[in-house]
Image: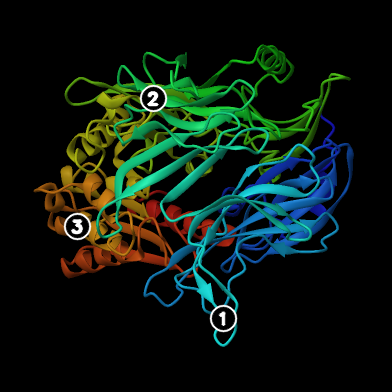
Amino acid sequence: MKNRVLLGAIVALIPVQTIAQTDNAALYGARESVGDISMSPDGTQLAFIQPARDRGSVLFVAGAEGGAPKAVFQSDGAPWKLAGCNWASNVRLVCTLYGVADPGVGHPVPFTRLVAVGTDGSNIKQLGQHSLKGAYGLHQFDGQIIAWPVADDGQVVMTREYRQQEQTNTRLSSIDEGLGVDMVDTASLRVRRIESPRIDASRYLADETGAVRIVGVRATDGQGMQRDLMIYSYRKPGSRDWKPLSRVTSDGDAFTPVAVDGKRNLAYGFKDKDGRSAVYAVTLGEAAAEELLFAHGQVDAGEILRIGRTGRVIGVAYSTDKPEFKLFDSEYASLAAKLQKALPGLPLIRFVDASRDESRLLLFAGSDTDPGRYYVYDKASRKLHEVALARPELESRTQAEVRPVSYAAADGTMIPAYLTLPPGRDAKKLPAIVMPHGGPSSRDEWGFDWLAQYYSAQGYAVIQPNFRGSAGYGDDWYVENGFKSWKLAVGDVNDAGRWMVKEGIADSSRLAVVGWSYGGYAALQAGVLDPDLFKATVAIAPVTDLKGLVERAGNFTNARIVSDFIGTGAHLVEGSPTQQVAKIKAPVLMFSGDQDLNVDISQAKAMEAALKAAGKPVELVTYPGLDHQIYDSTARADMLRRSDAFLKKTLQLP
């Protein structure tokens, strides 16, 4: 069980520098050793993406039983990075490349490309529409795989983005426009049309045979701007006629399909029950019989769990104090229970992939103190062997335990949170960090968090509150969202700091707030709501100006949705840190990538300018060519190192 048949060989092939065990910033800032991993249809091979220097990535292929991995494909991350790879056959892979660039429109935009490659690195093909020089409009996205045909012969069923195009002085042209579905041979690029492109289509769902059974259409206004309405239609087995299924808005009251079981003629998806997201199965017919599969009394249903080449639904994940799952499939429920006994101390078990016949499984197991490890399980022999570590550089280091806690907000409401304490230190009068999560439509979960673990390793107590405005706890907890209800959300964040001081965990003179994205916004607004509470503020890719956020969205088709989400009224000024710098007392350190699509760098620059104009201490560190995730090991290490130095200096730590 402890035989790491791949690990040594994998690490030996990656051209990365050896990280000194005393350099915590480099250790925790390093990207995960396994960014994506999948199993071949016959279960004999694994494909996995590993980081190269800085932001680069390499695709490797290795035998599931061991042997030296072979480098197949690589990207330098400038701008293309390998986002994920899966098997079109036992000798051919399909990878998604993701990049951000400015194509001459005045601001960065995202692009994706689907590329097929042989396991020997040969016959590389792009699977999206072949664009002529006279294409109308910007070709941003190649599409995505929606089914793996049962033959596993190198063909895929994929959506494809089409743009009208013509070649000057030739008869080459195409009037196709919109999102369609094709069967594509990944070696020869032969194409068989399955669904003609539709300008109004946003997504398609296919069943396990590759038959397209559901289409989703995003409603738009007269100017082509997206509305908060997705209209789903379905087909009966063997029919080409579309029938209405559901009309979905952000309130969650209508059924949102996620997967289709053609054999049972069912769609699986989400719909609210008693103000919380629940999982349903709906018959694809006029009667549309609805079966409730899972609902929880305190939290929302999370990810629908699927397995293998067919994407068969086997259960649902959800999170209370700790991540949990309910498995509908009795075989996998029994297997999961056995695995939890076989892997003590690694309760976070996930079925990652499977061979076509599901006789061999690829698993992940981890915990709060273990970043995770990957295993291959053979059902026939009942053998389980470890194949790779998520973060091998941390293998010999003791990590901090993460404890679910709750504390009383100012109005008495109990706020769930996670407390991470420095290993080997008494939890008394420690320098401490409140770390609100991003989103705001998100939540923190129990498990390994590289950012919290780094600060804990540096001697800080860290608390991560799931403040009101967080997702995952139902409509009442979500309130109006963390922007419209910013005073409630940020008030809960501040109360986390007060609780640590009251409990004697934190020293009130050495209390800081650190956040990323919405968390960065909350960190800055925390100093607006209570200027004397935190002595230092670190904001990574922060929202700082709500009105500016809405205006920036005007460059994109979701402008109306963003505007409705942010809202109108006094909170656009009261809830914008750039408009409230006079109240901020604590020194501020910010980080941002200049290719950030989620929160444009202009937000951080506006905050820097406003603080400087007010004579307040501020520093902005910019990472060229990087987006919201700052997905670069060197940049992340630099960010950790700088933020720790800033906190130590500002909090007057030794």
Which of the 4 quarters of the picture holds residue 63? top right
What type is the residue that disc 2 sits on? Lys
What type is the residue that disc 3 sits on? Lys
Per the image, label 3 sits on a secondary structure element best described as: helix
Relative image position of residue 243 (x, y in whole percent): 44, 33
Residue 271 is marked as 2
Q: Look at mark 3 in the image and give the residue it sits on.
A: 547
Residue 167 is marked as 1
Q: CA gap, disc 3 to disc 2?
A: 32 Å
Per the image, label 2 sits on a secondary structure element best described as: strand
Residue visible at 33% across and 65% down in the picture:
619
Relative image position of residue 526 (x, y in whole percent): 23, 44
On the question of residue 530 being in view, the answer is: no
Which of the 4 quarters of the picture holds residue 621? bottom left
Q: CA gap, disc 1 to disc 2?
A: 47 Å
Viewer-closest of 508 and 474? 474
Relative image position of residue 240 (x, y in whole percent): 54, 38
Vertical arrangement, residue 324 with respect to residue 397, above or below? above
Which of the 4 quarters of the picture holds residue 71? bottom right
Vertical arrangement, residue 419 with respect to residue 541, above or below? above
Viewer-closest of 488 and 479? 479
